[in-house]
Image (cartoon, helix red, strand yellow):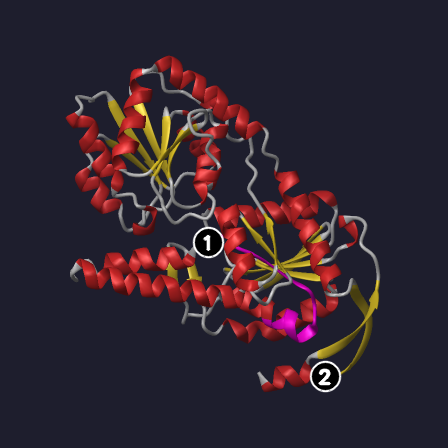
Amino acid sequence: MACLKAALPAFSFLTVGYSVSSSIRAAFFPDSYLEVNGAAMTSKRLTGYAQKMGYPFLCIHAGPKNDTWQDESTTYLSLKRSPFSFTLDEDLAYDPLFQRHMGKVLRSLMQFQPDVIHITGLNDVSIVGAYLAWKLQIPLVGSWHTNIHEFAATRLDNLLSFAPDGLRGKVTRFAEKNIMYGSIQYYRMPKVILAPNQELIDALRKGTNRSARLMSRGVDTDKFSPHLRTANDGVFRIGSVGRLRAEKNVRMLVELEKNLLEAGKTNFEFLIVGEGTEREYLEKNLGHAKFTGFLSGEELSQAYANMDVFVFPSMTDAYGNVAQEAHASGVPSIVSDQGGPKFIVSHGKTGFIAKDVSEFTGYTIGLMEDPSKLEEMKEWSRASAMSRSWDSVFESVYAGYAEAISLAGSTKFAGEREELA
């Protein structure tokens, strides 16, 4: 870092006003971009929005090779992770040597001259962005996409399944508390924090003493639509889409199936889309299930449309894009009362909020036995999704950029350099 510090320029700033989003030059450091998950999807949507609007935008992300290119108003810098990277989740990795790219990133920032830097989490890419924002005194915005404290605690609990319940509980609670504390400290660096639900906004605002704003999620109601349904065999399909991992609480599907069978229900099928370490367990223990693996494009859209109800038992998701995609497909969802998805569901209209497997079972049976209620909820779900625009989501992100610049003194590059003190 010493040689980098010596090479870093100091910039002279001048005060300007920002009345429109197009005057803001944003450098974006997404931790997840090419992967298959909600955070990556949202990151690509944000980049696409900036490009559509003609806003100057620099996107720096991990990729299969080092490369840089320009696409209209958007500049891309792809940086390859080293062989020392280790897997965090499916195709998402962390590279402890990623800071070797610091020089390339610095040159890109110097050329682009951003007014604001946007990071998305505690990972290799965003750490570089946060460090350079601090060194170059560029206003920093941080968006929260993943409840890593809850993810880590759930996985730790799974790994310690051999230990006594009391000990396991103490260890996982300690881990969750301290990971959340560390995350809070990290998010004290941004001037403005964007979070996907009110619970996180309140927690981050209190813990960081920073401005916190809502960054919800939109949904593509053309891509996801009930018009894509092809199933008409009378089988009641219970859908699940996402990573098949312990933190998603997918083993609850086995308990749900058991309860349905005990209630005398047999004409149903679980339609499970996704991959992960829990797939083997589910395949062994579910008797009425079809596993598709990862799907994308039209295949994914059709899978959603062929569901009758979407079941999402995860208690760790910060938002839950999949529930919103189900709604766009005209499919009501049953979600946990813990985490972000409960903020998407209008209980009794677009789905149900359940506190345990018993309630998941009861709500599922209720929809199986009341076709008219199911059809009504399908219509409500679709209407709800139609009101959620990606453009409005990203307009609020740019409002967050403007606020961060204002809090930093509404400063902008003047282009003059001098040595760092």
Question: Secondary structure under badge 1?
Answer: loop
Q: In this view, does 349 lie to the left or right of 59?
A: left
Question: Magenta residues, as a range?
Answer: 131-145
Q: Residues within 10 Å of mark 2 (few under 14, many from 20)?
A: few
Give the residue displayed 40% in from the left and 72% down from the top: 84
Give the numbered dot on residue 146: 1
Q: Disc 2, disc 1: CB below 8 Å? A: no
Give the numbered dot on residue 123: none
Residue 173 occupies quadrant: bottom left
Q: Can residue 248 be seen in this view?
A: yes
Quadrant the N terminus occupies: bottom right
Say which amino acid is labelled 2: Leu
Give the residue displayed 45% in from the left and 27% down from the top: 350
Say which amino acid is labelled 1: Thr
Residue carrying label 2: 420
Question: Secondary structure under badge 2?
Answer: loop
Residue 159 occupies quadrant: bottom left
Which residue reaches farthest top? 372
Nearer the observer, 377 or 73:
377
Q: In this view, does 141 lie to the left or right of 96?
A: right
Which badge, 2 or 1, comes first in the chain's sequence? Answer: 1
Give the residue displayed 78% in from the left and 65% down from the top: 411
Quadrant the C terminus occupies: bottom right
- Cα–Cα gap, marks 2 and 1: 35 Å
- Residue 6 percent across, percent down from the top left: 67, 85
Nearer the observer, 121 or 206:
206
